[in-house]
Amino acid sequence: MKTKISVGVLGIQGDIEENKTVAQEALNRSNVKGNVKFVRYAEEIEKIDGLILPGGESTVISTLATIQGGILHTIKRRIAEGMPVLGTCAGMIMLAKRAYDRVVGETRQQLLSNLDIVVERNAFGRQDDSFEAKLSIPILGKNNKFFKGVFIRAPIVIEVGAAVDIIAKFNNRIVGVRQGNIIGTSFHPELSDDDRIHRQFIKTVLDCKRHKGAQQI
Ligand code: GLN
């Protein structure tokens, strides 16, 4: 029987539609059975096999998520239990252990802390300083054509723990990381017309579910 997966997109704020669309396309193109839906409540987060934390504004997302009955605790626990997660831009900030901003210093926002990294928010400047750059991301396969990185008030990763692999750099700054089933990017793969990062994530979700299924037999 073909494994079916359920992917959630945290549907609170940010480019949630774009992530849902690309994830659905990635699912179809990878010929994987399953669905992608917005999740907003703890009961929904309990049932999914993988989660996408979209780009947007991390302080807004975590504040609203906190008001929403403490769903951050549920997300944090499920990731700690092994649920794959993809965090893009604000989503990666939410996954970090610590976040700071050159202007305001340590940002006292609620973070999930599952990903052993420290990030600097808005490291390339403000909205006006948004840009695109060609990135080389070897984990996307041998026939590695550049990935168009879309950077919008993007963070950079300034410290990584021992368990963290660096998967992308731009001008010697870390803009993509992976730690086990957690992938984080400073840029927005949902805005690139390129579903390779989402496909990589779908593959992780599928492998993780198959592995779990095999353990239960
Ligand atoms: N600067 C935003 C934050 O700190 C992230 C921007 C984005 O997701 N495009 O949350």
Image (cartoon, grey):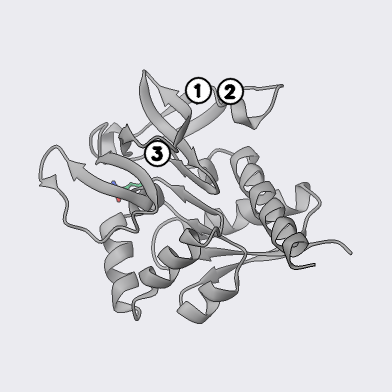
Determine whether the residue tagged by mark 3 lies in a helix, strand or loop: loop
x and y percent of residue 124 in the render? 27, 31
Instruction: Describe residue 162's horizontal placement relative to residue 195 as left or right.
Output: left
User: Which amino acid does the dot numbered 3 rest on?
Assistant: Ser
- Looking at the image, can residue 11 be seen? no
Quarter holding the C terminus is bottom right
Checking the image for residue 134, the label placed there is 1
Label 3 with label 2: CB-CB less than 8 Å: no
Checking the image for residue 146, the label placed there is 2
How far apart are the two marked residues, 3 and 1, measured between alpha carbons? 13 Å
The answer to whether residue 197 is above or below residue 48 is above
**Extreme-top residue of the structure:** 171
First of labels 3, 1 by sequence position: 1
First of labels 1, 2 by sequence position: 1
The answer to whether residue 50 is above or below residue 178 is below
Residue depicted at x 53% and y 29%: 148
Cβ of mark 2 under 8 Å from ligand 1: the answer is no
Mark 3 or 1: in front is 3
The answer to whether residue 63 is above or below residue 199 is below
User: Which amino acid does the dot numbered 2 rest on?
Assistant: Phe
x and y percent of residue 170 in the render? 40, 23
x and y percent of residue 157 in the render? 33, 35
Label 1 with label 2: CB-CB less than 8 Å: yes
Checking the image for residue 186, the label placed there is 3
Q: How many marks?
A: 3
Determine whether the residue tagged by mark 2 lies in a helix, strand or loop: loop
